[in-house]
Image (cartoon, grey):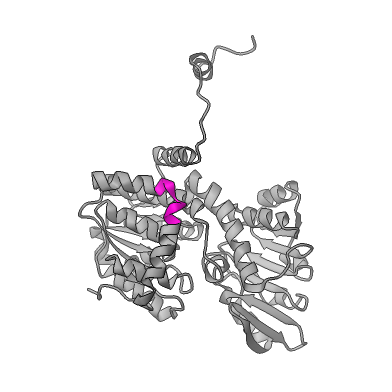
């Protein structure tokens, strides 16, 4: 078994404590669940292995699981997303945490291995690297694991592919597909935090810029909406005719990437796919174009093509690399092509993450109770969990719902009543 933790600097723990306490003050839903977990101990004796962005919000989730009786081992789900002060604080709190900002690829997977050394009975993933490592390198663990959860769109795509190929060895709850996750986290969280990352890295003015958003899923919708709100002229690139039509009806221009490449000042990818921006597009871009990625993996902008086209490369400021092409044009890559909202900023606001992580916490409890009876498939979050998270969020915002009268309920349940 790995040593108890590995973080960059334990002396940062007090700073981590303060930032986590700030997040807790903005996450009332999760704090209410923590109070409940502390009394009922629904995870007593359960060992949980998590591969998540090690941020202040994640710390609130981890402390909630521990309040419920769980032992937690945690690694980062991206080499640049760890907040080192948070990792230090969690280590002092007794979490088996293996994470620091700036991990190499080798170090990243070593940390995944360290988490798996604890032989978790439930996995919690963001991108599916933990689950795929179990299935490719530690298959003996599969019979020990009762289930897992997956946080993000990219991870759910990978896991559904595994299930389709008959390779998935234990049940996974797709937390990403909960209404109280993707309607809010993906749209409002990614929308705000991605723009935040671009602005922190560059300090550019968005107003008047031509900003290209690749992908019009819930994340892309959020980015496009926020960018337009700050005065950008937004162009959407899509492969789906339905999403492209929706973007058009929402008032955005819709181009192919080939058309958009010469037009854009700022490019943000949010597709979950590979080579969204590649050589043929880079060759058309104007001098000074900014490239950023909001997808989980750093594959959406083809970095090898960018390197081949460049005559020189230099760091302009933290999270900005200038690639000077052979014809003199300069292209600026943000955060090494990794998730710009976490590599160049702090990720989603706590108020959004409280709903995503409430789904995580309740889904983990559900797996502890029911996982042994589930087949190895990808499941949606149970409707009662999704609904409860929404109710708790509305309660936190002091919003009261309208209630159906007896007559209204009867009308909705009847087929006889029509035009009166």
Q: Quadrant of residue 417?
A: top right
Say which quadrant the N terminus sits in.
bottom left
Q: Is residue 272 left or right of residue 130?
A: right
Residue 239 higher or lower than 394, as above or below = below
Direction top: furthest residue: 420
Picture coordinates of residue 365, whole percent (x, y): 30, 47
Q: Nearer the viewer, residue 385 or 32?
A: 32
Q: Main secondary structure of the magenta part?
A: helix
Q: Residue at x 61, y 64 (%)?
A: 196
Q: Is residue 49 left or right of residue 297?
A: left
Does the segment drawn in magenta span residue 25? yes
Q: Residue at x 55, y 12 (%)?
A: 416
Q: Nearer the viewer, residue 388 or 145?
A: 388
Picture coordinates of residue 307, whole percent (x, y): 63, 84
Say which quadrant the C terminus sits in.
top right
Q: Is residue 35 left or right of residue 81?
A: left
Does the segment drawn in magenta span residue 105? no
Picture coordinates of residue 174, whole percent (x, y): 43, 51
Q: Quadrant of residue 14?
A: bottom left
Which region of the structure is painted magenta?
A: 23-30
Is residue 276 among the parts visible in the rendering? no
Residue 29 higher or lower than 12, as above or below = above
* Number of dots carrying numbers: 0
Q: Residue at x 46, y 48 (%)?
A: 355
Picture coordinates of residue 60, whole percent (x, y): 39, 57
Is residue 37 among the parts visible in the rendering? yes
């Amino acid at each position: 078994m790995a040593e108890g933790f590995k973080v960059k600097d334990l002396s940062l723990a007090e700073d981590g404590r303060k930032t986590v306490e700030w997040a807790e003050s903005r996450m009332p839903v999760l704090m209410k669940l923590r109070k409940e977990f502390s009394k009922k101990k629904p995870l007593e004796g359960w060992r949980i292995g998590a591969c998540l962005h090690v941020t202040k919000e994640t710390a609130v989730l981890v402390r909630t699981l521990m309040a419920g009786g769980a032992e937690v081992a945690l690694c980062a789900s991206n080499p640049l997303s760890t907040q080192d002060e948070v990792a230090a604080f969690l280590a002092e709190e007794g979490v088996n945490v293996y994470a620091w900002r700036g991990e190499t690829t080798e170090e990243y997977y070593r940390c995944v291995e360290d988490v798996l050394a604890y032989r978790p009975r439930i996995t919690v993933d963001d991108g599916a690297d933990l689950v795929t490592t179990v299935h490719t390198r530690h298959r003996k663990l599969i019979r020990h694991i009762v289930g897992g959860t997956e946080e993000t769109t990219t991870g759910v795509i990978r896991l559904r592919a595994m299930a389709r190929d008959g390779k998935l060895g234990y049940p996974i709850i797709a937390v990403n597909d909960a209404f109280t996750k993707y309607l809010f986290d993906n749209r409002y969280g990614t929308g705000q935090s991605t723009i935040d990352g671009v602005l922190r890295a560059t300090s550019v003015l968005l107003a008047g810029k031509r900003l290209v958003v690749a992908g019009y899923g819930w994340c892309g919708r959020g980015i496009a909406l926020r960018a337009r709100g700050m005065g950008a002229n937004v162009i959407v690139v899509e492969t789906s005719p339905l999403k492209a039509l929706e973007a058009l009806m929402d008032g955005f221009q819709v181009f192919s990437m080939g058309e958009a490449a010469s037009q854009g000042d700022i490019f943000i990818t949010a597709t979950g796919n590979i080579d969204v921006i590649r050589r043929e597009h880079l060759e058309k871009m104007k001098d000074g174009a900014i490239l950023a990625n909001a997808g989980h993996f750093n594959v959406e902008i083809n970095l090898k093509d960018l390197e081949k086209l460049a005559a020189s490369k230099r760091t302009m400021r933290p999270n900005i690399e200038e690639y000077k092409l052979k014809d003199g044009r300069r292209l600026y890559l943000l955060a090494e092509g990794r998730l710009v909202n976490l590599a160049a900023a702090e990720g989603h606001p706590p108020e959004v993450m409280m709903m995503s992580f409430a789904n995580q916490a309740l889904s983990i409890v559900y797996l502890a109770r029911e996982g042994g009876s589930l087949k190895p498939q990808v499941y949606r979050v149970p409707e009662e969990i999704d609904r409860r998270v929404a109710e708790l969020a509305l309660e936190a915002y002091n919003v009261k719902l309208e209630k159906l009268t007896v007559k209204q309920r009867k009308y909705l349940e009847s087929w006889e009543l029509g035009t009166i």
